[in-house]
């Protein structure tokens, strides 16, 4: 049973998909006027892991994420650089994909753009005008009338009277109410424009996401999300205009999810805060961070805090995440080493079906623990996608794997007693967790793991040679040489045992 925290109800709710076995998601994308910063990355990593979890849980997921490629900031950047608005948008969309690919964020099913959805936007605005929820000014501007919407403010919990009293924006005398917002902006000299029933112009910010989400997901869909800074006014306005146009207060998104801010330890990371950008120079954009640290380390750091909580991002935290990732990677390599030995035929491998939890193999306890931790992992994800707790369970399994592997390389677990199928099941469990979290999809660094496992590997190789020589001596009935090898190994702290499967060794 999956529970999600719905911003609309301000409580956790049991998730019930609109269509059985399917999940529909709309996530507000970036305005590509410059390269994405680390604060931009959090919602997309969050929704990527949610999408992975639903897919792994058997749902068919349809995921839409937009690009706001027509915007004041894009136009400003284009004018400053002497290029077109499209040049700026396309350049930074490429930068966005490069950064998200490095963070293992899988591509959405579709990325609609404002510039490519203009007909749908204009039609929706016309519907709002026809229904009396919007009005047209003499210059061609179109505004949504918040006073016509009796439930306006239900997502943010704000009241119109309070918003008006606390408004810090300069009052536009042309509006019917200070909180009315633009649906269509009349063209100004030097700006891109599109033809409309109200003259040349371009859409306001909020209407685009309504038009795109309804176009690609229908009048009702499961999830709508983004950063918590979008709750008001963006998402509030989306709800108002969408439900007004559809004539149904139960239409549009059913669950609203919002991730917390990323801070640098002092304040929210934001491109508009010049002092904060200056303070974090060289460690602000995703590209800058990735130049110093692996993408999977950054992804892990973003998921080690529950998505609704604020997250402090600085180099100290990244270094801590890198060390944590190294411990998870060590277990990955330990399982990989065991799997290679299994495939090389060094261990028992029974391909018949079995109950992994009932076995006399030394790995029996490990697989039982793995199954328990996998169950706990899913329980954490079921509880409002608690990746922080889920990763803790994965780390617990990594520790168990490390202890088992240590016993193996120290000779406390004999190769001939290891059931390969069970080890492979443990590896499947570990990689199932990794797939949902979204790590180990790029070359996994070996670093400390190689240093620590090189010596045991060498010892194993030398012991094979020594035991082979001893076996040759025994076959030639040269008992004195065979006994001498056994006794000298014992003196060195290694015990040799003769079994029906051959000689095996372990540390005394």
Image: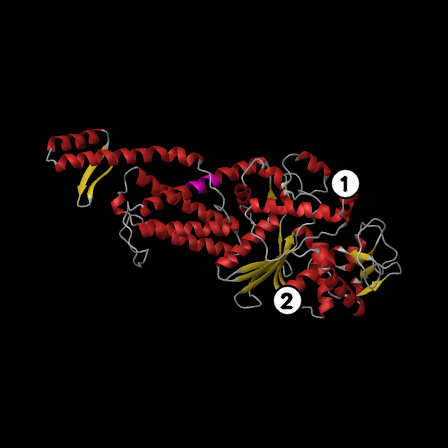
Q: Nearer the viewer, mark 1 or mark 2?
A: 1
> Who's the residue at 70% across and 61% down the image?
210
* Residue 157 spot, x, y in % from top left: 70, 58
The residue sitting at 11% across, 30% down in the picture is 480
Is 281 positioned to the left or the right of 195 in the image?
left
Which residue occupies 69% across, 70% down? Answer: 248
Asked whether 473 or 387 is in front, the reply is 473
- Image mark for residue 362: none
Residue 328 on the magenta span: yes
Residue at 68% over, 45% down = 91
Q: Residue 251, relative to residue 419: is it above or below?
A: below
Give the main secondary structure of the magenta stretch: helix
**Helix, strand or loop for disc 1:** helix
Near-viewer residue (9 or 142): 142
Mark 2 = which residue? 220
Left or right: 502 in relation to 356: left
Quarter of the image where the C terminus is located? top left
Q: Residues within 10 Å of mark 1 (few under 14, many from 20)?
A: few
Would residue 100 be found to the left or right of residue 205 on screen? left
Q: Which residues are magenta?
A: 325-330
For label 2, the crowd category at 10 Å Cα-Cα, with few meaning under 14, some 14 to 19 and many 20 or more, is some
Which residue has dot 1 on it? 81
């Amino acid at each position: 049973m999956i529970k999600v925290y719905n911003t609309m109800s301000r409580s956790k709710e049991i998730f019930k998909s609109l269509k059985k076995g399917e999940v529909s998601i709309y996530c507000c994308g970036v305005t590509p006027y410059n390269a994405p910063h680390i604060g931009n990355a959090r919602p997309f990593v969050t929704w990527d892991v949610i999408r992975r979890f639903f897919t792994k849980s058997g749902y068919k997921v349809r995921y839409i994420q937009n690009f706001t490629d027509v915007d004041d900031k894009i136009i400003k950047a284009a004018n400053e650089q002497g290029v077109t608005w499209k040049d700026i948008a396309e350049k930074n969309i490429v930068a966005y994909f490069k950064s998200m690919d490095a963070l293992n964020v899988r591509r959405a099913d579709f990325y609609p753009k404002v510039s490519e959805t203009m007909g749908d936007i204009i039609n929706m605005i016309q519907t709002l005008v026809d229904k009396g929820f919007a009005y047209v000014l003499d210059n061609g501007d179109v505004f949504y009338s918040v006073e016509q919407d009796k439930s306006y403010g239900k997502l943010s919990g704000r009241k119109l009277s309070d918003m008006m009293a606390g408004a810090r924006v300069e009052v536009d005398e042309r509006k019917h109410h200070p909180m009315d917002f633009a649906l269509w902006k009349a063209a100004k000299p030097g700006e891109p424009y599109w033809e409309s029933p109200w003259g040349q112009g371009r859409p306001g910010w909020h209407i685009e996401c309504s038009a795109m989400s309804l176009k690609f997901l229908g009048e009702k869909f499961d999830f709508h999300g983004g950063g918590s800074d979008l709750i008001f006014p963006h998402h509030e306005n989306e709800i108002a205009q969408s439900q007004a146009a559809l004539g149904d207060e139960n239409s549009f998104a059913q669950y609203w999810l919002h991730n917390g801010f990323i801070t640098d330890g002092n304040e929210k990371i934001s491109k508009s805060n010049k002092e904060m950008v200056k303070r974090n120079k060289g460690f602000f954009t995703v590209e800058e961070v990735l130049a110093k640290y692996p993408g999977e380390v950054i992804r892990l750091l973003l998921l080690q805090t529950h998505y609704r909580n604020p997250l402090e991002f600085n180099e100290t935290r990244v270094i801590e995440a890198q060390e944590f990732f190294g411990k998870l990677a060590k277990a990955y390599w330990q399982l990989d080493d065991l799997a290679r030995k299994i495939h090389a035929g060094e261990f028992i491998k029974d391909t018949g079906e079995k109950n992994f939890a009932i076995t006399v193999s030394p790995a029996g306890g490990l697989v039982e623990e793995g199954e328990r931790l996998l169950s706990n992992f899913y329980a954490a994800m079921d509880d409002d996608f608690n990746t922080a707790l889920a990763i803790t369970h994965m780390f617990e399994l990594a520790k168990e794997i490390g202890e088992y592997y240590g016993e193996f390389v120290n000779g406390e677990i004999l190769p001939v007693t290891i059931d390969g199928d069970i080890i492979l099941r443990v590896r499947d469990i570990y990689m199932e967790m990794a797939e949902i979290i979204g790590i180990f999809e790029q070359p996994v660094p070996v670093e400390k793991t190689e240093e620590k496992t090189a010596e045991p590997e060498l010892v194993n190789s030398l012991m094979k040679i020594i035991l082979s020589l001893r076996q040759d001596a025994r076959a030639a009935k040269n008992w004195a040489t065979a006994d001498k090898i056994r006794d000298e190994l014992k003196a060195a702290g290694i015990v040799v045992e003769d079994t029906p499967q051959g000689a095996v060794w372990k540390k005394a």
